[in-house]
Amino acid sequence: MDFKTFVFYLLATVMVLAALRVITVRNPVHAALFLVLTFFNAGGIWLLLQAEFLAITLVMVYVGAVMVLFLFVVMMLDINVDRLREGFWSYLPVGAVVGVIMLAEMVLVLSGPYFGLDAMPEPPAAQAGYSNTRELGRVLYTDYVYPFELASLVLLVAMVAAVALTLRKRAGSRYLDPARQIAVKRADRIELLSMPAEKE
């Protein structure tokens, strides 16, 4: 076993164990930290595959932005974990059936002739001056331009929906009316009183 294979198995093992801890740990903050560890190991595996741009993007976007926001929301909401876990065991049979079906599908797909060494041989060594970032951009904007634009449209719809959800009327909420703030006059807010001077 060469060093590259050893590093791959090490990163893959840590990533699988961290992913399992994400769904088995009781504290949501600890689950988020285990998810950060999972992302780091996935980025390391992408580095082994010579996909440096994807690895750096994964670490910067998900670990540096999304997971920080997730941790902030989890700690700010102070979620009652015990209340969320009520009735957990009643859903266990359904979850077990769904998990077994997904596992069987993955075994059927991965054990087929599509993922063997014959179907996916090792790519040739990159030439001098090769940039996987440039190659990724070329593939995205030529061969996969329509799926790429469709994904951007889906993200745009999600952004509009998120803004619309925040602007809906809620009972008991206070809102500011900029038109009323601008139209206010001094006489409506300030009253000057004439008082005699007082001496001690």
Image: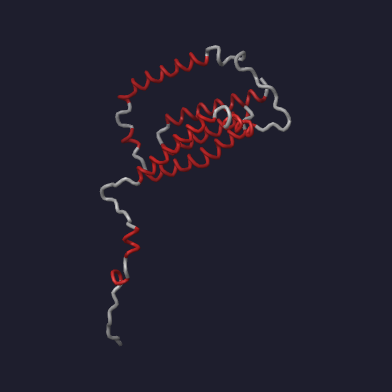
Query: For this rendering, which residue is in front, 124 or 163?
Result: 163
Residue that appears at 39% across and 41% down:
162
Q: Give the quadrant of the N terminus.
A: top right
Residue that appears at 55% across and 30% down:
42
Question: Residue lying farthest bottom?
Answer: 199
Task: Kindly tell me whether residue 31 is visible in this rendering.
Answer: no
Task: Kindly tell me whether residue 174 is visible in this rendering.
Answer: yes
Question: Residue lying farthest left?
Answer: 171
Question: Which quadrant would residue 166 be assigned to in this image?
Answer: top left
Q: Position of residue 93 (x, y in %)?
A: 33, 20
Q: Position of residue 94 (x, y in %)?
A: 34, 21
Seen in the picture, residue 99 relative to 140 is either above or below; the reply is above
Seen in the picture, residue 74 relative to 178 is either above or below; the reply is above
Q: Position of residue 151 (x, y in %)?
A: 48, 32
Question: Which quadrant would residue 129 be assigned to in this image?
Answer: top right
Q: Position of residue 180 (x, y in %)?
A: 31, 61
Residue that appears at 53% across and 12% down:
112
Task: Answer with left or right where residue 125 lies relative to residue 181.
Answer: right
Question: Residue lying farthest top?
Answer: 113
Query: For this rendering, which residue is in front, 25 or 158?
Result: 158
Residue that appears at 53% across and 41% down:
64
